[in-house]
Image (tube, rainbow, N blue to C red):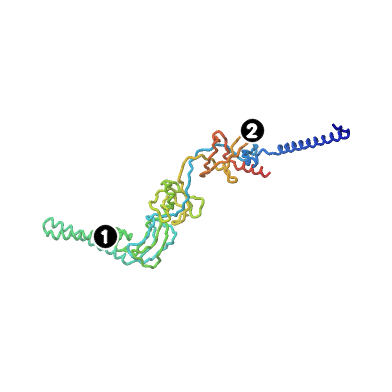
Amino acid sequence: MKSISIRQLAALVGLCASVVGVSGCGSNETANAEGKTAQSAPVTSDSSQAKANQPVRVSLTQAQYDVAAIRLGQPTPRTLSTTLKVNGVIDVPAQNMVSVSVPFGGYIRRIQLEPGMRVRKGQPLVVLENPDYIQVQQDYLDTKAKLDYADLEYARQQELSRDNINALKVFQQTRSNRQSLQAQLAGLAQRLAILRINPANLTPSNLTRTLTVHAPVSGFITNVPVNNGRFVNPADVLAEITNVDHLHVRLNIFEKDISRIRTGQVVRFGMGGDATLAHRGNIFLIGKSIAADRTVSVLAHPDGYASDMIPGGYVTAQVDVKTQPLTALPEAAVVGYQGQSLMYVLERKQAKPATYQFRQIPIRTGVREGGYVAVTLPPDLDPQQTPIIVNGAYSLLSKLNNSEEE
């Protein structure tokens, strides 16, 4: 065995010491780096947790909890509706569209109507003039006078017939003449009523040559095809009135969806491009025929009339086609982030110092109505035993995002 000199031994000992020193320094630096990382790590977990399929948690102090106005609660069963988006028009029943005409022709002496004007039932619309109106009144007064004489003659002949003074034939002729005059007078009285002249008040001193046409219904003037000075016949239309007291919404439902429609279902609709769907109504009639575009006509009654409901106007609508109890949370309990719907549950509450630790949970959402949203919770979550943030969830999402940026 070869001997080692003192100088060689000293060099070997120095080399070993340097190797041990380098290893020791590396260990210390690693420990220090780990310590710094542990010290700088925030309470709030960042996105690396989610990437590792670990729960995302966020902690709040009591002050942060109060500022965020967080409120805890549980999901509740609520009756929410699934909807069907459709379109249609504002429609008017045939009995509510009135064409105003006159039974007797005449010249228009006064008309002051414009499309869009609102009129009341019985309101004067048009004044006509025609000498024939006077003739009807004259005929009535003349027939009435003849009937008065016929009544006297009938009474006289009846008395004579009772005493067998005159022939029965004369009495029968008198009675027949009297009945004929009664029929004529009744017919003329009806013609006067059409002219809105009261026969009981008619005298030779108050004959009139004009006829005032009144509105048969209340509503809006939609068309005025005549003008002053024009002669109109009984077949001519003086004005058209639409009664808006019983408007309805005519919806076009596709053939594939008609099986989901029922009478009584709620309809929310808006005029034109109104996305707020501010009006409500209920379906009362479902059509029994399919149009060329494969749609079925469905009628709904609005809850009330509004000034923007113009007959023929385009309507966008939603039909509540199914109503059922669903597990729901307030919309303030659910936030959307990166294509997910999220909620937060309370995992731990510490008294001193007061802190709250929440866990972020992805969920599925459904129908939204009246400030609530239907939710499907994870099967391993007991909502009755786990406090859920029902207000202030957005504050936690913001804190998480801010922590990631830092």
Tag of residue 380: none
The percent position of residue 141, horizontal first and vertical second, equals 27, 62
Residue 405: image quadrant is: top right
Q: What type is the residue that disc 1 sits on?
A: Gly
Q: Residue at x 51, y 50 (%)?
A: 276
SS at circle 2: strand
Q: Which residue is more in the foreground, 85 or 41?
A: 41
SS at circle 1: helix
Mark 2: give few (<14), some (14-19) or many (20+) Cα within 10 Å.
few
Q: Are marks 1 and 2 in contact (CB under 8 Å)?
A: no
Furthest-front residue in view? Answer: 1
**Which residue is tagged 2?**
350
- Tell me the quadrant of the picture where the N terminus can be found: top right
Q: Which residue is more in the foreground, 88 or 170?
A: 88
- 282 relative position to 206: left or right: right
The percent position of residue 229, horizontal first and vertical second, equals 39, 68
Q: Which of the two labelled residues, at mark 1 and mark 2, occupies the earlier sequence position?
A: 1
- 255 relative position to 22: left or right: left
User: Mark 1 and mark 2: span between their CA atoms?
Assistant: 98 Å
Furthest-right residue in view? Answer: 6
The percent position of residue 373, horizontal first and vertical second, equals 53, 43
Q: Which residue is more in the foreground, 145 or 170?
A: 170
The relative height of residue 360 versus residue 173 in the rendered view (above or below) is above
Q: What type is the residue that disc 2 sits on?
A: Gln
The percent position of residue 41, horizontal first and vertical second, equals 69, 39
Tag of residue 187: 1
- Tell me the quadrant of the picture where the C terminus can be found: top right
Q: Which residue is more in the foreground, 29 or 232?
A: 29
Mark 1: give few (<14), some (14-19) or many (20+) Cα within 10 Å.
few
Residue 47: image quadrant is: top right
